[in-house]
Image: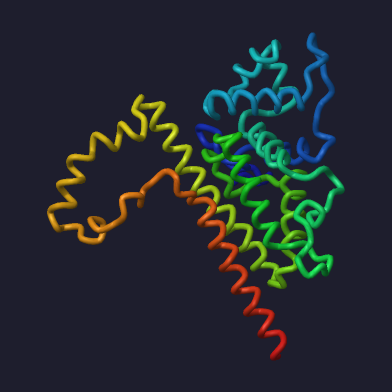
Amino acid sequence: MANDGTTAATGDGTATGSGDTARSLELLWGGGERPSRGPKPGLTLDRIVTAAVAVADAEGLSAVSMRRLSTELGTGTMSLYRYVPGKAELLDLMLDRVLGEPLPAPGEKAAEAAGTDAAGSGEPDWRAAVDTMARSYLDNLRRHPWLLKINQARTVLGPSALRGLELALGGLRGMGLRDPELIGVIITVNSFVEGLARTQADAAEAVRQTGLSDEEFWDRQRPYLERAMLSGAYPMMATMAEDTFSADFDHFEFGLRRLIAGFEALVRERAEAATTA
């Protein structure tokens, strides 16, 4: 790590915080966008980020480059560098942009978005908040599958990221858990959603790369799998129901309901401990 707080950029620019973090923070929090100069006075940082997100959505993160964006925006490549140092810093801006998409409008409280609890206490219904959090994140990952390719271990936190965290914590405050545990709830839910979304995205990518549908792929293996099941070597799998791997089973709903049930058990445990203390 350099003394100025920057980190060495990865070759493909897919790690947030891998560029000049000081410059990224200036651009994210305002005061960092330089005035337009040159023959394209309409060029702005907002237009650059919007174009980068559009290219990534359509063709993947690898298609995003300063040269490609200059073509999309009809300007010279060097003009872009007056606004953003490079792809690594641009990635920080892109991430904060899409993280802000599913959020309520500024000023709208998490309780208003998620509703209040059944007891009418005025506290946000944390179950609804968890449900909304999971569904919003899944929708965001489906709109922007390139998010799954990013290493977010060292995210440069911008306004959208912090506002999303603020709203999430506000929606969960009725759980009565300690602060580290509330962060644990968010991490647990997001990890579940990311895992499921990655599986779906990988399946879609496999179809594109091979030209084989899922049905065609498994049909090719069917004779071998049937012989394996008849061999007696796999007794548990051989006795599973025919619909075990059916595409009709909603793994997202199943997993989300189980997560919420687990959180409910912890909340009850803490409430009971508080009353007996």
- Can you say which quadrant of the picture contains the C terminus? bottom right
* Image position of 261 (left or right of 129): left
Furthest toward the right, the residue is 107
Image mark count? 0
Displayed quadrant of residue 138: top right
Residue at 52% from the left image edge and 37% from the top image edge: 10
Q: Nearer the viewer, residue 268 or 8?
A: 268
Is residue 270 something that shows in the picture?
yes
**x%, y% of residue 221?**
23, 38
**x%, y% of residue 131?**
65, 55
Displayed quadrant of residue 130: bottom right
Furthest toward the front, the residue is 242
Q: Nearer the viewer, residue 251 or 108?
A: 251
Residue at 76% from the left image edge and 38% from the top image edge: 28
Furthest toward the bottom, the residue is 276
User: Does residue 241 sit above or below 172 in this rendering?
Assistant: above
Residue at 67% from the left image edge and 61% from the top image edge: 127
**x%, y% of residue 175?**
70, 69
Q: Nearer the viewer, residue 11 or 274?
A: 274
Furthest toward the top, the residue is 39
User: Does residue 136 sit above or below 86 in this rendering?
Assistant: below
| Coloring applied to the structure | rainbow
Residue at 59% from the left image edge and 23% from the top image edge: 65
Is residue 20 something that shows in the picture?
no
Q: Nearer the viewer, residue 152 or 26?
A: 152
